[in-house]
Amino acid sequence: MKIHEYQGKVILASHGVPVPQGKVAFTADEAGEVATTLGGGTVVIKAQIHAGGRGKGGGVKIARNPDEASQIAREILGMRLVTHQTGPKGQIVSRVLVEEGLDIKRELYFGLVLDRASERLVMMASAEGGVEIEEVAARTPEKIFKAGIYSSAGLAGFQARELAFGIGLEGPLVKKATRLMQALYQAAITTDASLVEINPLVETGSGDLVALDAKMTFDDSALFRHVDILKLRDLEEEDPLEVEASKSSLNYIKLDGSIGCMVNGAGLAMATMDIIKLAGGAPANFLDVGGGASAEQIRNAFKILMSDVSVKAVLINIFGGILRCDVLANGVVAAVKDLGVSVPIVIRMEGTNVEEGKRILRNSALNFTTADTMGEAAEKVVQCVGSN
Amino acid sequence: MAILIDTETRLIVQGLTGGEGTFHARQAKVYGTNVVGGVTPGKGGTVHEGWPIFNTVSDAVRETGANASVIFVPPVFGADAIMEAADAGLPLVVCITEGIPTFDMMSALAILRSTSTVLVGPNCPGIISPGKSKVGIIPGHICQEGRVGIVSKSGTLTYEAIHQLTKLDLGQTTCIGIGGDPLIGTSFIDALKLFAADPDTDAVVLIGEIGGTAEEEAAAFIQQSFDKPVVGFIAGQTAPPGRRMGHAGAIIAGGAGTALEKMKALTAAGVHVVENPADLGIAVAEQLGVSL
């Protein structure tokens, strides 16, 4: 789960990471008030959306006084902010962070991620802050310093110092950076964060280190023990169909194509998308109904697929291992009748009781197309869309 | 021969008294697996479906002589169950549970790596050695004894591969689902090493998916030291970046972990990579020189 920058800063600050003075505002008036509380001087207005690249998209602006803060917030709030991460449709801005302006001497990068290969969290630091870290990694990997953390010891002092010296910090900044990195690590392990990224972390004119940005992503599997973090979820940032699907415990991701997919198992669901593409079509979604999908789940899945107006045909690909094909077939027939599904449906099922399942589909008097293999199913469903 | 499990496997089920545990213990028994008991804390001393239940894994191992465990406990207890099985000295632990928090797994693996226990999973369908034994949830009736090994991050996509092979009369030595989580016990490389040492395995099917670099690491290993033919498929060629595709580990992050990179690495290592998942079975037949 992702959260907004201002929410991340509150969490980081509570663990001792220095962040700029500031507060979120939902209206232009509120933005002006925050600017006044911050002393009435120069502030930065930052659009709060989950995607990165906000500055380049025009979502970060400087205001010299509260009136200007209010005026700029009015421009940003409600705008459709397009960045390289939002896609062409962009994301509507409904809140801004109003922050004190800082005297920035240099920009650094700090990040904490899981390294799957070493099975450890890795703290990363670079003197190349303020630019995409992926670019730094691709062009000048030697400018990124890393330390693999032993979970029994946590981020050790010597590791943090090595990073601080590595990126060229000197004097009192080394100690400040060490403390800051250890605070980042504490924040991450306390909240089950799968990613913490501060880009940039700035050195100010007065010699302080301050987190100018904050990106935190949390392990979805651990949210059950973080009720406070779950409250930070912003549904406006998510696709409405995906929100609806998550209520029925369906794993659904909206894509741009016209062929709706219903599959059991994540790997098979991805493979089904791939094979549709190979057959010349485009998948409208990823949808995993789970290993033991019930009739209820199939109905819920159809509801979601049918709510997507771009879906012109549906491909159901089920490998019934535990799930029996006759149960699936009955579920599909009931859902299609019930919901009045009108688009063509191609069904490929395999596994336990497959013959009985096919008989149920044939006798349903509904217009299903069946297929014996994944390849055949993909070709048939692409034909359906083509002939529409 | 087969790898990891065979007719000598004596299995206990952690979470046997739960719905999933009961169902799959019965299925394993029907398949011929020697299920010797179960573990449910607090229910020790009782009997469930004819199986003795123990409070701890260590009790179960002592009383039954078990040499393998399969875990069907809720995610919040998953890492603990893994640590308990490793601490009891079991050589093999298969964890089916999906949704174990990553940091829980990180701690469990740190302990596991200091023992000789082999963990398969979590978030996996388990292992089957057709005709011999099954530990997990892979449906037995789609399998056939034979000479092809399968190692895969996926569940139902593995069944698809098994099914394609069986339809072509290409049986399997052992099929291993290693799981789709970011942190897992057995890697592609671990499984490949076992298949390399198994004289009855002639070829291997490797099924990966987007996310992480396990497939690239496997490619490097295959290039250096794996001589049997490998057929590969990577799921998620059409997956959008930055989105988690069902499995906790299946995500293209920061431009890394794409299907294309993995396919390239495997191809460069001499793996026969199929773009189309429907071609897996035929590709294996070609690699083995079997005429269809």
Image (spheres, helix red, strand yellow):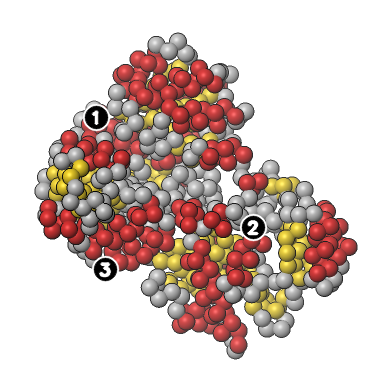
Which residue: 63% across, 46% down? A235
Chain identity of mark 3: B
Residue at which label 2 appears: A4
Q: Position of residue A29 (x, y in %)?
A: 84, 57
**Residue B107 seen anywhere in this rendered image of the structure:** yes
A191 left or right, relative to B289: right
Q: Amino acid at mark 1?
A: Leu
Q: Are marks 2 and 1 in contact (CB under 8 Å)?
A: no
Secondary structure, mark 2, is loop
Q: Amino acid at mark 3?
A: Ser
Chain identity of mark 2: A
- Return the residue nearer the eye: B179 or A375: B179
Relative to B203, does residue B212 appear above or below in the rendering? Answer: below
Chain identity of mark 1: B
- Mark 3 Cα-neighbour bin, 10 Å: few <14, some 14–19, many ≥20: few
Residue at which label 1 appears: B168
Secondary structure, mark 3, is loop
Q: Quadrant of residue A183?
A: bottom right
Residue at which label 3 appears: B114
Relative to B151, does residue A173 appear above or below in the rendering? Answer: below
> Rounded to the nearest whole Å, what is the CA distance between mark 2 and mark 1?
53 Å
User: Which circle's residue, 3 or 1, is located before the other in the chain?
Assistant: 3
